[in-house]
Image (cartoon, rainbow, N blue to C red):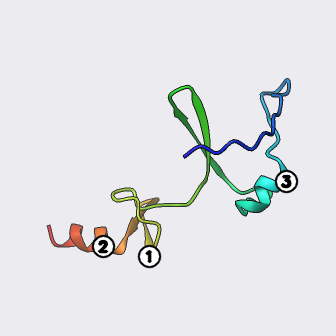
Amino acid sequence: MIKSTGIIRKVDELGRIVIPREIRLMLEIQEKDPLEIFIEGASIVLKKYHENCIFCGNSKDLHLYKDKLICSKCKDDIVNL
C-alpha cells in the first residue's frame, strides 16, 4: 500500500535524494543502513535491507555456507536430500 507523505524532494546532480528525517525515524533507518532498491511498474521502492536465506527468504537463524546465507530449515532439507 502506498501512502502519500506530501513531501517532495529533488534529485541532485549526482542522482541522490534525501529521505526526510521524520521518515527515517519512523522506519528506524540509521546512517549507513543498507537499503534495497526495487522497480515496481513506474515506481521506485526503497526497503530497509535484511539478510535472508538464499532459498526461502527467511531472515532468522541464518548460517553462512560458502559465502551464502542459509536458514536452519533449508540446511536440514538439503542434508535430508
List x then y, in percent, for residue 72. Answer: 35, 75
Relative height, residue 34 to residue 44 (above, below) = below
Label 1 packing within 10 angstroms: few (<14), some (14-19), many (20+): few
Callout in the foreground (3, 2): 3
Instruction: Name the side, left or right, on which 1 lies relative to 70.
Output: right
Q: Which residue is mark 2?
A: 73
Instruction: Name the side, left or right, on which 16 lies relative to 68.
Output: right
- The residue that appears at 82% across and 27% down in the rendered structure is 14
> The disc labelled 3 sits on which kind of residue?
Arg
> The disc labelled 2 sits on which kind of residue?
Lys
Q: Which of pointers 1 and 2 lies earlier in the amino acid sequence?
A: 1
Quarter of the image where one finds residue 7: top right
Quadrant of the image for the C terminus?
bottom left
Find numbered disc 1 in the image and state the secondary structure of the residue it sits on. loop
Relative height, residue 50 to residue 35 (above, below) = below
Relative height, residue 12 to residue 6 (above, below) = above
> The disc labelled 1 sits on which kind of residue?
Asp
Q: Which residue is mark 1?
A: 61
- The residue that appears at 46% across and 73% down in the rendered structure is 60
Label 2 packing within 10 angstroms: few (<14), some (14-19), many (20+): some
Find numbered disc 3 in the image and state the secondary structure of the residue it sits on. helix
List x then y, in percent, for residue 62. Answer: 44, 71
List x then y, in percent, for residue 77. Answer: 22, 69
Q: Which residue is mark 3?
A: 21
Label 3 packing within 10 angstroms: few (<14), some (14-19), many (20+): few
